Amino acid sequence: MNRGRLKSIVWKEFIQMRRDRATLGMLIGIPVFQLMLFGFAIRQDVRNLPTTVFDMSRTQESRQLVQRIAATGNFVITRAEGSYADAVRAVDAGHARAAVIIPESYARDLKRGRSTAVQVLVDATDPTASQSAIGAAQMVGQQTNLTLMQARLPGLGATSQRPLVDMRVRPLYNPALKSALFIVPGIIGMILSNMLIMMTAMAVVREREHGTLEQLIVTPLTRSEIMLGKLVPYVIVGLVQITTVLLVGSLLFHVPIRGNILDIYGASLVFIVCSLGLGLFISTLAQTQAQAMQGSVFILMPNMLLAGFMFPREAMPVAARLFGLLLPLTHFLQIMRGVILKGIGLRELWPQSLTLIAFAFLFFSFSTARFQKKLG
């Protein structure tokens, strides 16, 4: 082996790497970005679940119970409802992840030494978050009973009397806390996002490198027509992927589809256009296929970690949750889990739907504006 020739080719590669500053920046920046995501944003301990309260008792005793629930740190009281139906509706629509229902006779039963039932409804679409909430609610019930018994009968153990506060925790939408019910709707979004963004991010760059872009440029097609022509085939592919995942998830993992199937396909169509527009926008920024691939990874990693696919968003810092709102997948997953698991429709999920439509319009507009019918 000739060391001189080897040294020359190695030095040539370093020079080429230095000239391609965009690729070099991604090679250095992406690992740092991933480290920050894993180190600061990803947490398993779920706290601060938005919680609504329907307090029919409206007494000092009921307010003390609510304060104990909030003091656990697992719940944040954000709303107060006027009826049981409003409390359930708040959890259905995602405005709250838990609801505390205190009966009218709560204080009266405690004063008379009778057992009283307090219901805690927990959104169990995310098993990790719901398990923490269920455990915290049960702990509040035990502590409340211990405090009441010690106050009424000093010197007696907590086991000598029946519990006065019967804390009944009811997991909604996923009573068995099966992880498959949480994962399968999320896989729909991840498959569409991963496949479509990466495939379309390579589209314009690949044609430029293969020399076929010149043939498109000399045609009478407008920029919008070229962009739409690249989107339509992948839209059909995305719809086929959704159908496949829904069938396999229903037959193999027994995931129920409680909502309207048309809502699923309608929201998915918008998300497909949104993902394709983002991929095309990346392709107009990249000069090589390597840059397009790295740009896709730069989007896909936050998608997987911050959108709520694997890790509960409630456990993330505020900055990570706010950044996650900039990802279309975050809103799409909320729609999918709401329609499939909760059985609600786009009427309740209109904020997420409008956000997806806005993302789709912006990404397609940006990619069309960036694409120029000229070489160089």
Image (cartoon, helix red, strand yellow):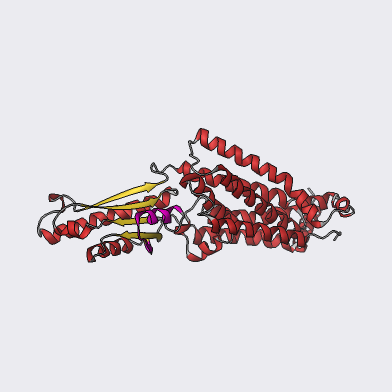
| Residue 166 seen anywhere in this rendered image of the structure | yes
Q: Quadrant of the C terminus?
A: bottom right
For residue 179: magenta?
no
What are the residue bounds of the magenta stretch? 76-92
Q: Position of residue 26 (x, y in %)?
A: 67, 60
Image position of 104 with respect to 338: above or below: below
Residue under the point 74% across and 63% down:
21
Is 253 positioned to the left or the right of 224 in the image? left
At 73% across and 47% down in the image, what residue appears?
A: 232
**Residue 138 drawn at (x, y percent):** 29, 52
Closer to the camera, 30 or 227? 227
Q: Position of residue 121 (x, y in %)?
A: 35, 52
Does residue 82 belong to the magenta stretch? yes
Residue at 41% x, 60% y is 50
Looking at the picture, tell me which residue is in the foreground, 74 or 247: 247
Q: Does residue 3 appear anywhere in the picture?
A: no
- In this view of the protein, which residue sits in the foreground, 122 or 207? 122
Q: Residue placed farthest to the right in the image?
A: 218
- Residue 1 location in percent, x, y? 78, 47
